[in-house]
Amino acid sequence: MKSLSFRTRRGFTLIELLVVIAIIAILIGLLLPAVQKVREAAARTTCTNNLKQMGVAVHNFASTYQDKLPSTFWACKWSGSGYQPTGSNFNVIILPFIEQDALYKASQPNNSTSASWDAAVAGTPTGTLRSAVIKAFQCPSDPSMQSGFSAYQVNQWAGSSYAHNYMLFGTIKVTEPSTGWVNSNPTCTVANCQDGTSNTVAMTERFSACGSSGSGGNLWAWPGSNWNWNAQDWGVSFANQPTGGNWNQPPQMQPVYNTGVCDRTRPQTGHSGSAQTLMLDGSVRGVTTSVSQATWQIAIIPNDGLALPSNW
């Protein structure tokens, strides 16, 4: 009778197992940086596209309103039959041109409120415009943005990862007689920007929260630089000269948003190496650490008559 034979299977030795684990660890170590680079590239592309969308909005606004630029803060808006008080900031003004016409219409004067940020909007946390989350105002690389809200948000004001150049959009003060509010109007139009649209910064990145005290943020519907004492802390503009601290300093590169290192009087970026910056001609470029303070100041002032240095 033929006997049955059994073949024993040899398992991994400890050394072999350790070698396999080491190889897997090396592969993961090689893969993770690549994944992170792909994610950062995607986030940078999204951020660039957001700024381009707002650049198109600025030019479409100018085409609609006799070449004028949107204001940092308007105490009044044209309603068809005359000017009415609304207290709209730059972001509210461009809403129709970033495919947010419904929100813009909701912000217009009605019987219940004259302030755009308190206009009734269904479906938001507060039922008002100020807590509407808008994707175009969010950069994926902003570490202080949490589901569309600033980490330091107050009373459920939604946040923004971008800010407009106050030196371009808000330095001319005009008092509205019917309200006593002061409009912050643009320095120039698209056609007569002295330094040229390709040489003037329109917008750049700014964290939605910045500073160790938790008393500063970037809230997209905040009324602007002429409203309340802390408008600079919560408003969506940068280069708020002459009361803006380091108003003429270039963007900070990846500061920790909830420490004293993060300076809310200047722009910030969560991207590595460069801050995405919209020029008035609609182009977007990366501003790196090679751009000096003097060069940045020339770029944000639209009418100084100075040429941009070679480090731009």
Image (cartoon, grey):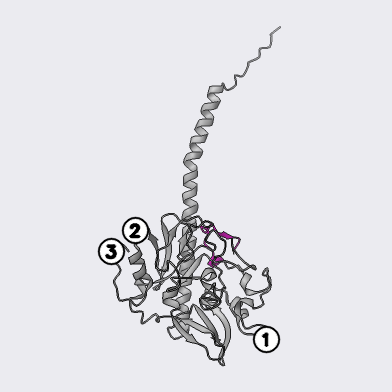
Q: Per the image, is 183 magenta?
A: no
Q: Amino acid at mark 2?
A: Ser
Q: Which residue in the protein does label 3 denote? A: 310
Mark 3 or 2 closer to N-term? 2
* SS label for mark 2: loop
Q: Are marks 3 and 2 in contact (CB under 8 Å)?
A: no
Tell me if residue 114 can be seen.
Answer: yes
Q: Per the image, is 141 magenta?
A: yes
Residue 172: name its quadrant. bottom left
Residue 306 is left or right of residue 148, and the answer is: left
* SS label for mark 3: loop
- Residue 264, above or below 83: above
Q: Which residue in the protein does label 2 denote? A: 290
Q: Look at the image and give the residue range highlighted in magenta.
A: 135-148
Q: Position of residue 312 (x, y in %)?
A: 32, 64
Quadrant (top left, top right, bottom left, bottom right) of the N terminus: top right
Give the spatial CA distance, label 1 vs label 2: 52 Å
